Amino acid sequence: MIKNIAHIKFRGSNIGKFEHLHIENIKVKDTCVIETDEGIEIGHVLNFEDIDVDSLENENNENTESHETHDDESSHDENISADEELSEELKDIVAAEENHNVKPKNNKNKIFNILRIADEKDLEQHRINTEDAAEAFKICKEKVNNHNLDLKLISSYYFLDRAKLLFEFIAEERIDFRELVKDLAAHFKTRIELRQIGVRDEARSIGGCGICGRELCCKVIRGKFETITIKMAKEQGMLLNTMKISGQCGRLMCCLGHEYQAYCSLKKDLPKVGTKLVFNSVPAVIKDLNPLNKKLLIETEDKRLLYISVSDLKTNEEGFLIANIKAE
């Protein structure tokens, strides 16, 4: 079944799918009052899209199955990286990735509801909430110090109806903040939620530029964080150097995951590293390959290193690769 839904940005840079057919004359850039799993919020319409609801449900089921097989993939990555000399710092990053990989609720494709187009009263309440949340952040920070809790407060957020006040924080270990919650609830007279987030969430919240010079992937591309592995870096021919493959958050870069499937697809029809061939009647072996420009680095029997194009390779009657060309 095809249904037209609205993509709405809310609470910073969260983006979700929303029903809108019951709202008249809704358009892009409209400010709406929406209802999510967590409460009532203010959001802005980004665009509209026709989606297949049945396909969406199937995708959710597939995502659930992929989480179940994640442990098998992780052990496979360990085998792949076992023969690589990784630095101690890089090993720590990989271990942190595995230990702090929290599986979020699978609501990426859930369709929520728009309650109404926001009026002046809603916008004024949102403005008040934003100011009060900033003040609540300062008060919470003081109370954290009073309770001697080892955590770093990241953000505070009042839901539109003020039914809940959300604080996000990061901490190295699990924190017993029950007494802090009681203290905050007594002060603010509303439901308090303290949510522990990871260093990736912190980077997403703060924002910044990556080593590529562009805005951080986690800030631009919303959704749950995927597990990033050393295998992804190796598949893309990255130098296994901490400075080269770790992001602003200190974990393996998100772009390794975003580009992984593309590299796998490009390399699918290319000969593998170590494949033997005959270059201008001289035995040779493939030492490296670049899937983006379709170039191969080969080493001949007489120890020459040469670049050739994949399109120059031919297969003879015996099934051997040959390349009779003038190399670069």
Image (cartoon, rainbow, N blue to C red):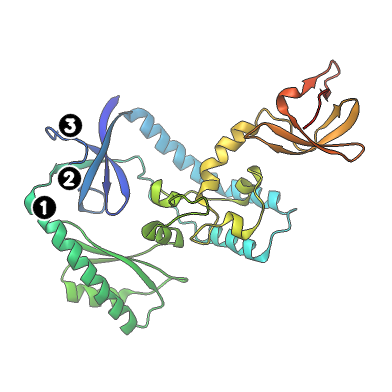
Circle nearer the N terminus (3, 2): 3
Tags 1 and 2 in contact by the CB under 8 Å rule?
yes
* Between 263 and 323, the one nearer to me in the picture: 323
Question: What amino acid type should be assigned to the residue bearing mark 3?
Answer: Leu
Res. 122 mark: 1
Picture coordinates of residue 258 (x, y %)?
Answer: 51, 43
Res 154 quadrant in image: bottom left
Res 94 quadrant in image: bottom right
Q: Residue at x 45, y 40 (%)?
A: 63
Determine whether, in the image, residue 322 is placed left or right of residue 114.
right
Question: What amino acid type should be assigned to the residue bearing mark 2?
Answer: Thr
Mark 3, secondary structure of its residue: loop
Q: Which residue is mark 2?
A: 31
- Label 3, label 2: how many angstroms apart (C-alpha)? 16 Å
Mark 1, secondary structure of its residue: helix
Mark 2, secondary structure of its residue: strand
Circle nearer the N terminus (1, 2): 2
Q: Which residue is mark 3?
A: 21
Question: What amino acid type should be assigned to the residue bearing mark 1?
Answer: Asp
Picture coordinates of residue 136 (x, y %)?
Answer: 22, 71
